[in-house]
Amino acid sequence: MAELKSFGTDTACGPERGGENSAREKELPRLILKSFQHLISQSESVPKMFHLLTGKLSKFFSISRAVLIAFSHRENSLKAIAMKDHQIIGDGLALTLPRQDSLLYDVFDNGSVYLENYPGAFDGNFFERKLLLDDDTKSLVIIPLRFEDNIRGLICYSSPIAYAFSMIEEGLLDRVFEKFGASLTKKLPASRF
């Protein structure tokens, strides 16, 4: 089983930051949350909601690949249900992910944000590598989606920019992902999935 890695907050996005948040970083979570609440009300499906959130975040982060994974209570497994790869969008997926040597199941069980920069020695299985990484990926983040202390799924983002997701690891967007987890649970209840 893969050992989970998480890098401390010293992985700041710039050489001269010194760990302090800029005014933009302090304002960013509030702006995204406000915008996301509006998007939720417009979104009829989970994949559409995911693509809208990813589109919003892409304005601030260099996201090359995005994958939404939901936990299926019926099958006791993780399933990739939406994906965005550059400009290609995949909806209507329900791809069951293998458990053997799985980084995704480890993150799901552990419940902590996983961040890896320069993921050359990727800890997941071959299938996860193909699903999550491009040839030029320099940063990967896997975010557990919670609702009422239960993890309901994962959002995975990769970027060609090293340290692209440090703000996510620092918890600055936790409320956005909590709202997404609540919406995921409401739109995809455990009794149906």
Image (spheres, helix red, strand yellow):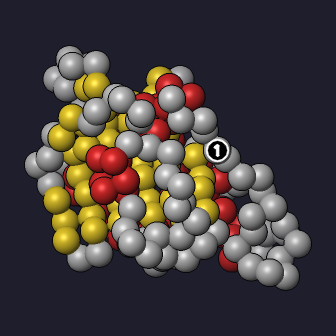
Of residues 85 and 127, which is closer to you in this image? 127
Q: Residue at x 14, y 47 (%)?
A: 93
Question: For the view shown, which residue lies furthest in the left direction?
Answer: 92
Helix or strand or loop: what does disc 1 sit on?
loop
Residue 97 against residue 169 in the figure, above or below: above
Amino acid on which the number 1 mark rests in the picture? Lys
Asked if residue 182 can be seen in this view, the reply is: no
Residue nearer the viewer, 154 or 4: 4
Q: Percent x, y for residue 151?
A: 46, 29
Q: Quadrant of the C terminus?
A: top left
Using residue 168 as the reference point, say whether residue 155 is left or right of it.
left
- Where on the picture, by quarter, is residue 23? bottom right
- Image location (x, y in percent) of residue 100: 36, 29
Q: Which residue is mark 1?
A: 5
> Residue 87: x, y in percent?
24, 76
Residue at image position (28%, 19%) is 76
Q: Residue at horizontal 74%, vertical 64%?
A: 11
Density class for disc 1 (Cα within 10 Å; few <14, some 14-19, many ≥20) is few
Q: Which quadrant would residue 13 be assigned to in this image?
A: bottom right
Q: Nearer the viewer, residue 105 or 147?
A: 105
Q: Nearer the viewer, residue 158 or 59?
A: 158
12 relative to 178, above or below = below
Q: Quadrant of residue 124?
A: top left
- Tell me the residue at 21%/35% (across/down): 96
Residue 6 pos. (x, y %): 67, 47
Residue 179 falls left or right of residue 96 = right
Q: Residue furthest right?
A: 18
Q: Is residue 113 visible?
A: yes
